[in-house]
Image: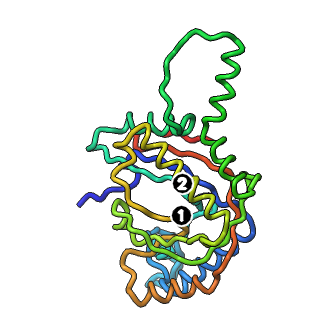
Amino acid sequence: MAVQSREDLTYAEIYRPVEQDERLATFLDRVRFSGDEVFGTRINTLVTEPAVLEGEDGLPELVNTIQGVDSPRLEVYGSGQIRLPLLDRRIEPRLNYGGRFRWAVGRLLTKPGDTAYRPVPRSAEEERGRTEKRKRDSLDFIFEQIGLKYGIEDQHHLEIPIQALDIPVDPPLEHLGSEVQLVPDPKSKVTRMLVEHAGVCLRGLGRHSPKAANPYSPTGLRIPFARMPSDATESEIEHFLGSVEENLPHKLALGYFKDHVGGSSWQRVRR
């Protein structure tokens, strides 16, 4: 039976990448160690290798042997894939809505507010004023203004404390196994600022396309970092999560926000 993958969807993300520093590397190394200890490995593929063995006549004989190649049962995401999503929306092809969805996301990035547009002739001075206004209307500017409310001026490097673990519901990918996520500390002003940023993203998308923003399922800020094997037992899951929790609380650094819109036949990355 065919199963759905993320590449079968048109999707949009606005996210903060986790900086690839020693803290992240150390945490992921500990996760891999716990995964190997709890889940072990599985034979991922078979390869043929030549070997010299002693034949029946006592002479050396060249033969081909089949060797199994093991891989970890726990999938730990690469350091460049670790991110905190502020917006994560997905549209199935059968809804026939991909083009409008991508347009709405593009408008969200440049003009998340709700202002009518009417083209009229303008002087050079008026055009300069409009340019400045577009900057003020942009997602970048709004994020910066929210940051100032919390006393956070540097939006390019955010220290965020991690408090707990979570397992989300992810129907399109549940056949691959349960994902494991890090939960930021809600007492941190950085976390509360990012919650406001996420709200701006969803409301802005809804202004340009209510269909793309709804139905909406409430969730919190999470950082996915691994996926457990689909055939993991309850005992293995409990042991693994307990082992990872021993590394918490932890602290990670987030970079400036990025957006990623793509699908099986269309992709755009903003850096």
- Residue 40 placed where, x, y %? 49, 83
Compared to residue 194, the image places residue 137 above or below, namely: above
User: Disc number at residue 170?
Assistant: none
- Report whether 173 appears left or right of 252: left
Amino acid type of the residue that numbered disc 1 sits on in the rendered structure: Leu
Residue at position x 57%, y 87% in the image: 243
- Report whether 263 appears left or right of 29: left
- Residue 167 placed where, x, y %? 45, 73
- Give the CA distance from mark 1 to mark 2: 8 Å
Q: Judge the density around disc 2: few (<14), some (14-19), many (≥20) Cα neighbours within 10 Å.
A: many
Q: What count of labels does the image hold?
A: 2
Amino acid type of the residue that numbered disc 2 sits on in the rendered structure: Ala
**Camera sees residue 70:** no
**Residue 42 versus residue 74: which sits nearer the camera?**
74
Specify the farthest residue to the left.
1
Residue at position x 58%, y 84% in the image: 245
Colouring rule applied to residues:
rainbow
Which residue corresponds to mark 1?
221
Compared to residue 202, the image places residue 178 above or below, namely: below
Residue at position x 38%, y 68% in the image: 169
- Residue 55 placed where, x, y %? 47, 81
Which residue corresponds to mark 2?
198
- State the SS at label 2: helix
**Residue 46 versus residue 19: which sits nearer the camera?**
19
Q: Are the residues tagged 1 and 2 within 8 Å (C-beta)?
A: yes
Compared to residue 104, the image places residue 62 above or below, namely: below
- Residue 178 placed where, x, y %? 41, 72
Please state, as top left, top right, bottom left or bottom right, where the N terminus lies in the image.
bottom left
Compared to residue 86, the image places residue 188 above or below, namely: below
**Residue 57 versus residue 15: which sits nearer the camera?**
15
**Residue 269 versus residue 13: which sits nearer the camera?**
13
